[in-house]
Image: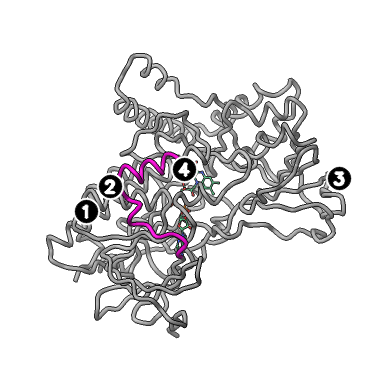
Amino acid sequence: MNVVATKPVGEIKQMGHVDVLIVGAGISGIDAAYYLQKDMPGKSFKLLDALESFGGTWRSHVYPGIRSDSDLFTFGFGWKLWSGPPIATADEILAYLEEAIDEQDIAKHIQYQTKVRTASWSSADKKWTVISERLDSGELESYTTDFMWMCQGYYEHKKGFTPVWPGMENFKGQIIHPQAWPEDLDYKDKNIVVIGSGATAATIVPAMADDAKHITVLQRSPTYMFAAPNRNDLVEQLRELDISPEWIHEIARKNVLYTSAKLIERCQSEPDVVKAELMAGVQQYLPEGYETDVHFNPKYKPWQQRIAFVPNGDLFQGIASGKASMVTDHIDHFTEKGILTKSGKELEADIIISATGLNMLLLGGIEFDLDGELVDFSKTVAYRGVMFSGVPNLCWVFGYFRAASWTMRADLVSELMIRIFQHMEEKGVSVVTPELRKEDADIKLGPWVDPEVFNPGYLQRSLHLMPKQGDRQPWLFTQDYWDEKEAFPKANLDDGLNYR
Ligand SMILES: Cc1cc2nc3c(=O)[nH]c(=O)nc-3n(C[C@H](O)[C@H](O)[C@H](O)COP(=O)(O)OP(=O)(O)OC[C@H]3O[C@@H](n4cnc5c(N)ncnc54)[C@H](O)[C@@H]3O)c2cc1C
């Protein structure tokens, strides 16, 4: 049965037409605007964002110590130099993005506090009608657009993922998710338990350790961690040699990507050796006899989940000084005073931080319909992990999760989309739709991201909602920068894409 779309009701202000509508003014949206402006100067465009300002993730996350775990030479844009330390705080990233917006004169195209609710494609008019809501006034607005460039990220900004544990309601202290950090949280001299040991926990713990009485990290199973100084020695040396900033930026990017490629190769060819090296790297910061084997010895293969980078080993310094400690155990239930673990340990806490990850959200929670029929994206097949079979004039910037940064893919997707726009102009057409070819009759479909490649909990929980990938090009989504950087520029744009 076809599911029919319902539209927001009430008075709707008509805002006119733009050639391209970008949803999201985070890293991906700013990148898309840069490429459109540079390569398609004739196209009008607008960015809509629900937040009160630019930056997406880096504005909505305000927990103590919030920082990147990718280096900014590659997490930053290819087209704007980064000159700070490799790992950057949210404030440093926002300052960089603000400069990028100013230099490229993008601000005039952005409208904030505007949440896109629905998008309806009309085959007759060959355009989308988008209805959005002003979060400051509740007013509904409507735009028409030829193309939707979706840069709304991959997770629900409103609310993080907190599992339900028995007895939570009995706990007398505060339970906080890092995504909803209370501005006025007073944790001085308090006992804190952080549940989870991913990148967020690795960031929060050292940032809070000095002021808290004690912080315990309670993890079900360990995460790979990589400790190193927050410095790129090659960059430092090039600076001393007075090499130009442009060259340094380019060399730093190549250096980071080369090092990552080598590490992935080694993770695949000698996972046990890499694992031993990562564990030894952690051990060097910890006192002799520390149970590294218990707390820093993950069950999965290195790189199946993101390796948490610990700049200057700050997390381990906290453990070594006695301000922080690790417990690897399962939660049995919450008590009035804290958490009782399955092995019978009682962890007392004034504050419990649930660093348990995020909820994925498909395309910003926007309801899409084609001529009135709702789109079920889980029934579509992704064209190179960018566009979706049967869905015209829409792309989604979904970056890299592991080895390369998110932004490295945002750049590749932008370049591919610009090629597609230019191809459409040459052909004199205005609609592009991915469609399976005759030879795809026997295509085998698999999950959006192969769990062998990357399998964190938030992705596993949502895979059933996500588009599928096929077993051949152009329907693969490899999450492999080195593969896509060769394949995207050479892609035959008449293969798997229909134009009219
Ligand atoms: C804490 C944290 C740290 C991370 N660190 C790294 C890292 O070091 N390296 C890395 O590669 N990746 C990292 N990531 C992944 C990260 O989200 C991306 O790298 C990057 O910031 C995503 O940028 P984006 O612009 O695509 O999306 P986002 O930053 O998620 O921005 C999307 C924007 O779209 C807006 N939006 C969404 N839906 C709608 C709607 N319906 N209407 C209007 N606006 C909407 C949102 O308000 C938001 O401003 C991290 C993620 C988190 C949560």
Identify the secondary structure beneath mark 4.
helix
Label 3 vs label 4: CA separation?
40 Å
Q: What residue type is disc 3 on?
A: Glu
Disc 1 is placed on an element classified as helix
Q: Amino acid at mark 2?
A: Ala
The CA distance from mark 4 to mark 1 is 29 Å
Q: Nearer the viewer, residue 272 or 90?
A: 90
Amino acid bearing label 4: Leu
Residue that carries the numbered disc 3 in the rendered image: 346
- Tag 1: amino acid: Arg
Q: Secondary structure at mark 3?
A: strand
Q: Earlier in the sequence, mark 2 or mark 3?
A: 3
Residue 452 point in image, percent of width and height: 50, 49
- The magenta segment is 94-114
Residue 4, above or below 324: below
Q: In the image, is 4 to the left or to the right of 204?
A: left
Q: Which residue is mark 2?
A: 487
What residue is rendered at 33% in x and 67% in y? 389
Label 1 lies in ligand 1 vicinity (Cβ under 8 Å) = no
Label 4–label 2 contact, CB within 8 A = no
Q: Residues within 10 Å of mark 3 (few under 14, many from 20)?
A: some
User: Mark 2 against mark 3, which lies toward the viewer?
Assistant: 3
State the image coordinates of residue 354 (x, y, percent, origin top left). 69, 50
Task: Work out which quarter of the rendered image holds the N terminus and state it.
Answer: bottom left
Asked if ligand 1 lies within 8 A of label 2, the reply is no
